[in-house]
Image: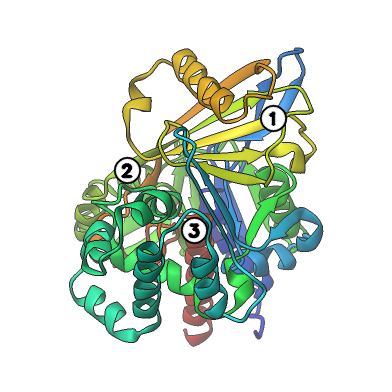
Amino acid sequence: MTKTSPTENVLIVGGGWAGLATAIKLSSMGHSVTLLESARQTGGRARRMAIESHDGHSLAVDNGQHLLIGAYHTILELLDEVGVNVEQNLLRRPLTLCMHSLQGQSLLLKTPRLPAPLHLLFALLGACGLKTGDRLAALRFARALRGKKLSAELEHRDISVARLLQQYKQTARLITAFWEPLCLAVMNTPLHEASAAIFLHVLQDAFLEHRADADLLFPQTDLGALFPDPAIRYIEQQGGHVHLGMRVSSLKIEQGKIHGVYVDDALIRSQKVVLATSIPASLALIREQYALGALQTQLAQFQFEPVTTVYLQYPAGAQLPQPMQGLVDGMTQWMFDRRYMNQPGLIAVVISSRGPHMDLPKEQLGDRIADELARLFPHWPASLSRFVIREKRATFSSQIGVNALRPENQTPVEGLWLAGDYTNNGYPATLEGAVRSGVQCANLIHQTTINS
C-alpha cells in the first residue's frame, strides 16, 4: 500500500492488541502515531504476568491462556510485519480434539491432511467415540455449513447456537462432547445464549477455505513476548511513541470534532484519536458527550463474560499426550501443557464463561481442579502449587443479536475512531477480532487522510 506523506500525529488510547494493531498498521503506511496506555505494560487482556512457583521463583505466564488457529490470518500477517518468526514462535498442529470424561468415555477427532472441507468430513467420519447416528448428524450440519443459505438466514434473524444445533438434529452426545465445548472455547458464551451468526462465521473461516485454517497454533512463549513487545519495538522503529502509565481522563470535543485528550489536566492535542479501550473504559470517556449519545446507548447494552485460568505446577514428568485436551463433564474445560513453552510440569486449565466455579474461593477451586486432573491422570504425582486468575469481564458476551449493537470504527465525531474486538468485524471476542478491528480502523483512517 502506498505510504502517506507525513501527517498530524494520530493518538491511540489503549495498548491492547487492537490498539497495537492500529498503531502498527498506521506506522507501516507512514503515519506518525503516539500510543497511550494506562497500565505499566501493553497487551490488555492478553498480557504477561508473573506468578510465584512452589520453589519461590517467578514464572512468566499469561493472564489467561489463549489459543490461536490457522484462520487467524490478520494476526499472522501482523506478527510477520513486526518481525516475529511465526514458525519458531507458534507450534502448529493439525486440529486434534481429545475430549475426556470423568466417566471413562472420550471423543477423539483429528483432521487428516486433505483439502478443505474434506478434512472436516473425514475427521467426523473417523472420530473415535461417536456412534453412526452421531456421525450422520455431524455430516448433516457440515453440509449446511458449506451453503450460503444458512448464513443469509442468520444474518436476517439470529438465533442461539443451541437452537441451530436443534434445527439440524444434532445428537445429545455430539453436542456434549463436541459442539458445546467448541462454542465455549470460541464464543465464551453459553450454548443457549450464543449467537449462531457469529459461531457460523468462525466455523466457515476455520473449515471451508484451506485445510491449514483449522490448525491449532500454540504460542511457545508468553503472549507479551509473542506480540506486544515486538509491536512496541516496531512502532518505535517507525518513529512512533508508546507511553505507559498514562491514563486518559477525558476527551476534548468541540463543534463535532475531536481536538485531543486530557491526561489528568494536561491536554494532548490531536485531530485524530482512536479509542482502543475496553467497552467500560470507552463508555467512561464518551459519557456526557452529546454527539456520542447513540454510541453510548449501544455500548451500554453489551454484557460480559468471565474467563478463569488455573495454573497447576507438577513435577516435570507430568505431561499431556497433546498440547491441549478437554473435559466434558467436570469443572475443568480445557487443559494446556506449557512444557511447549519451556515450562515443564505446568498445566493451564481454562474455564470459560459463567458457572458454579465463580462462587468458589480460589483455594477451593484449585483443589477441585487438582482433584479432577488426579482422576484423569492417576499416574501423575500431586501438584506442587496452584494459582488462580479470574478475569470477571474478560470478553463481551457474544449473545443472540449482538452484531446489531456493534459500532463501526468511525464515530459521529470527526476525527474520533474506535478499535476493539466489540466493533463490527463479525468475530467474537477473540484476539483475531481485536486485531482485525485495529487493522480495519487504520485502513479507514489512512483512506480518509489521503482523500482529504
Instruction: Give the percent coordinates (x, y) of residue 217.
Output: 65, 57
Which residue is found at the position 19% from the left and 77% from the top? Answer: 156
Q: Nearer the viewer, residue 396 or 18?
A: 396
Instruction: Give the percent coordinates (x, y) of residue 379.
Output: 68, 24
Give the numbered dot on residue 430: none
Secondary structure state at the residue bearing disc 2: strand
Q: Who comes first in sequence, dot 2 or dot 3?
A: 2
Residue count near mark 1 (Cα–Cα under 10 Å), binned few <14, some 14–19, many ≥20: many
Instruction: Give the percent coordinates (x, y) of residue 208.
Output: 50, 78
Which of the 4 image quarters holds residue 7?
bottom right
Task: Identify whether 441 is placed above or below 185.
Answer: below
The residue under label 3 is 434
In the image, 171: left or right of 233?
left
Residue count near mark 3 (Cα–Cα under 10 Å), binned few <14, some 14–19, many ≥20: many
Q: From mark 2 to mark 3, how far is it between C-alphas?
A: 16 Å
Give the numbered dot on residue 346: 1
Which of the 4 image quarters holds residue 293?
bottom left
What amino acid type is highlighted by mark number 3? Ala
Instruction: Give the percent coordinates (x, y) of residue 273.
Output: 46, 60
What amino acid type is highlighted by mark number 1? Leu
Q: Who comes first in sequence, dot 1 or dot 3?
A: 1
The residue under label 2 is 304
Q: Nearer the viewer, residue 344 or 176?
A: 176
Q: Who comes first in sequence, dot 2 or dot 1?
A: 2
Which residue is found at the position 64% from the left and 70% from the top? Answer: 112
The answer to whether residue 410 shows anywhere in this view is: no
What amino acid type is highlighted by mark number 2? Phe
